[in-house]
Amino acid sequence: MNKLLEISNLSVVIAEDERVLVNDVSFAIEPGEAVGVVGESGSGKTLSALSILGLLARGLKIGSGEVKFQGDNLIQASDETLRKIRGNEIAMIYQDPMTALNPVMKLGDQLLEVLNSHENSIAKPREHVLEGLAAVGIPDPKRAFESYPHEFSGGMRQRVMIAMSLLLSPKLLIADEPTTALDVTIQRQILALVAKERRRRNMSMLWITHDLGVVANLVDRVIVMYAGRIVEVGTVKEIFNSPKHPYTVGLLASLPAADSSKDKLASIPGVPPKPWQVGDSCAFSPRCWKSEENCRSKRPELSDRSASAVACFFPEGSSR
């Protein structure tokens, strides 16, 4: 099967001094597949996602690597080509919808603007927008069409953002922690909505989150990042039932227990290093209970680049 998205040896650096923020990241997404990228703040997960559409902040740049979408390298694509792809073939949902919605423009006009900015064969744009709002659970689409963003709650604004991202039926949806600011009940509703729409459209998805629990029932495969690198890759079942990297084990241990039997949540001691500070060592070794001298003097590489891999000298279940 041809890969829809294929990222190879991607690095992101600070333009001024070439300090590395994302280091040698490689992964692919198949048509219709959902992939979750998890890790603490600063792990490089959001920068990897923003690199796909050329949306890195000023002062950052691609240091090396390729980002291929349907076989075409987007890193070499012109601004005009990227504009045609954004929102049309690849759409993005952001953590805070208020950063993506214009506060002085009615929601309906903003959604129509998405349609008008791309060539499409939609004969009745207004009706298409109303149908899109209804599909994501907006109770009164006509009222929403004439409303401003501040007139809606955070959960409803996020539904509007999802409707906006799906208007042109993209092949790939990138979601950057879109439920982090929502309460647990609304979060579950949004996750269920996204899962339903992905299945209905057979759409690929890249879901960025710091919370492993969020992706448990949402994606097919999980990529775990730490200090700018991928440290483990596996199916949801593999990651949750038999995690290999000590960092993944720590992330899972910090999740609340379903039976609320934990008196307090576990945590990983210490803080992640800056990616450019790691050098030739395992970035997780200062926080790892399995660390040995070998970990502090050599950098473990992913065991392979297949569907399941781990970058660790002493993965769980191995003999030492």
Image (tube, helix red, strand yellow):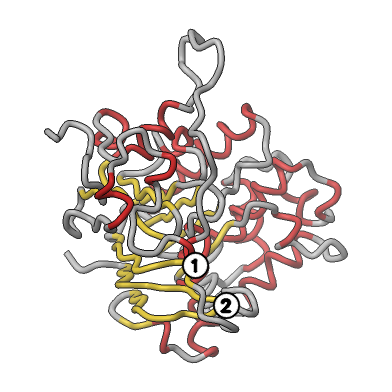
Pointer 1 residue: 21
Amino acid type, callout 2: Leu
Specify which label sits upstream in the sequence, 2 or 1: 1
Mark 2 vs mark 1, CA separation in Å = 9 Å
Q: Position of residue 193 (x, y in %)?
A: 52, 40
Pointer 2 residue: 60
Q: Nearer the viewer, residue 272 or 44?
A: 272
Amino acid type, callout 1: Leu
Q: Hey, which quadrant is residue 181 in on the image?
A: top right
Q: Which disc, if any, is residue 137?
A: none
Q: Is residue 203 left or right of residue 144?
A: left
User: Which is in the foreground here, disc 2 or disc 1?
Assistant: 1
Q: How many marks on residues?
A: 2
Is residue 32 depicted above or below 215 in this figure? below
Looking at the image, which residue is at 12% across and 33% down? 319
Q: Nearer the viewer, residue 144 or 235?
A: 235
Q: Where, quadrant-wise, is the N terminus in this rendering? A: bottom left
Q: Position of residue 146 (x, y in %)?
A: 82, 56
Q: Residue furthest front?
A: 293
SS at mark 2 in the image: strand
Looking at the image, which residue is at 60% across and 42% down? 179
Is there CB contact under 8 Å for labels 2 and 1? Answer: yes
Q: Position of residue 301 (x, y in %)?
A: 24, 58
Is residue 283 depicted above or below 63 in this figure? above
Question: Dot 1: few (<14), some (14–19), or many (≥20) neighbours within 10 Å?
Answer: many
Q: Position of residue 242 (x, y in %)?
A: 24, 31
Q: Nearer the viewer, residue 170 or 319?
A: 319
Q: Residue furthest left?
A: 319
Q: Is residue 207 left or right of residue 72?
A: right
